[in-house]
Amino acid sequence: MIFKRAVQRYGRTLEPETPFQRAGQVWDERIGSARVQARNWRLMAFGTLGMAGAMGSALVWQSLQSRVVPYVVEVDRLGEARAVNEADVSATPTDPQIAWHLARFIECVRGVSLDPVLMRRDWLSAYDFASQRGARFLDGYAREADPFANLGQRSTSVQITSVVRASDRSFQVKWIETAYERGNKAGSSHWTAILTILTRPPHSADILRRNPLGIYVDAIDWSRELEPAASAQAEAEAPQPAPPSPEIASPSGSEIMP
């Protein structure tokens, strides 16, 4: 059995603890504990401040969200409600829905009524379906054409003939305008327009009531169509020159004029 002798290492001998060292150690522990507590309280304060800021931001974001819940009511021919379902806010309007709104927009802008109250209502309704760019076009058209100039004397009825999709954001609208002066028909003309639209979901009850599907006319380009049929009819109704009389030859071979 081998016994090992303890090795004495004089270089690692601890120094004797004096009363001054014990007092200094107690003081260091006291100050260190206060510093640690201050650091912990500081971290907790910053954490609470960050949580309060996050909750405030979440509250502001929640207050900016739409509180409008649209519903779709299906009715029958008599107007009785058949089904009531919550509308999908993210749903995209269908082509028939867009076509109806665009037809209504053209009727409000191009039609001229004898009643100034109805004219004002139609124009306000048209502005509800126009974006800022479309509203600027309507302002320019109103200044140039002045549809309110001949109220009570001249009226124009609009008959929509077709509304078809031309591209992803554009639709082609065709209609017939019939003008009346003092109750008598003054003429008719065919028109074609390319309307560019954009969709924005309504974010308030007022916008939901005026434009429930969020369809806005952003660009307008309309022009009058050429009417070759009318020109051909006018030419047909124009007086034609009399046909030349036939020449009659005599038996002797000389011509006898009638």
Image (tube, rainbow, N blue to C red):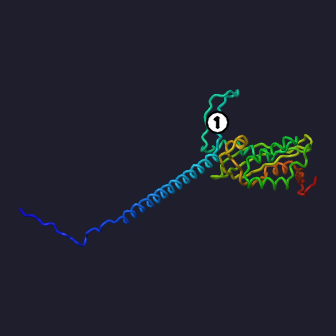
Q: Nearer the viewer, residue 37 or 81?
A: 37
Q: Is residue 5 above or below residue 40?
A: below
SS at badge 1: strand
Q: Is residue 36 above or below residue 68?
A: below
Q: Nearer the viewer, residue 189 or 169?
A: 169
Q: Amino acid at mark 1?
A: Tyr
Quadrant of the image occupied by residue 71: top right
Q: Is residue 248 visible?
A: no
The structure residue drawn at horizontal position 77% and vertical position 48%, both measured from the top left corner, is 127
Total count of labels: 1
Q: Nearer the viewer, residue 234 or 44?
A: 44
The structure residue drawn at horizontal position 79% and vertical position 53%, both measured from the top left corner, is 138
Q: Residues within 10 Å of mark 1 (few under 14, many from 20)?
A: few
Judge left or right: residue 150 versus residue 99: right
Q: Percent position (x, y) of residue 5?
A: 13, 66
Q: Which residue is mark 1?
A: 71
Judge left or right: residue 169 versus residue 183: left
The structure residue drawn at horizontal position 22% and vertical position 72%, both measured from the top left corner, is 10
Judge left or right: residue 219 versus residue 24: right
Q: Is residue 144 above or below residue 115?
A: below
Q: Nearer the viewer, residue 48 or 189?
A: 48
Question: Extreme bottom residue here?
Answer: 11
Quadrant of the image occupied by residue 24: bottom left
Q: Is residue 5 visible?
A: yes
The structure residue drawn at horizontal position 56% and vertical position 51%, both measured from the top left corner, is 54
Q: Percent position (x, y) of residue 157?
A: 82, 43
Q: Quadrant of the N terminus?
A: bottom left
Question: Extreme left residue here?
Answer: 1
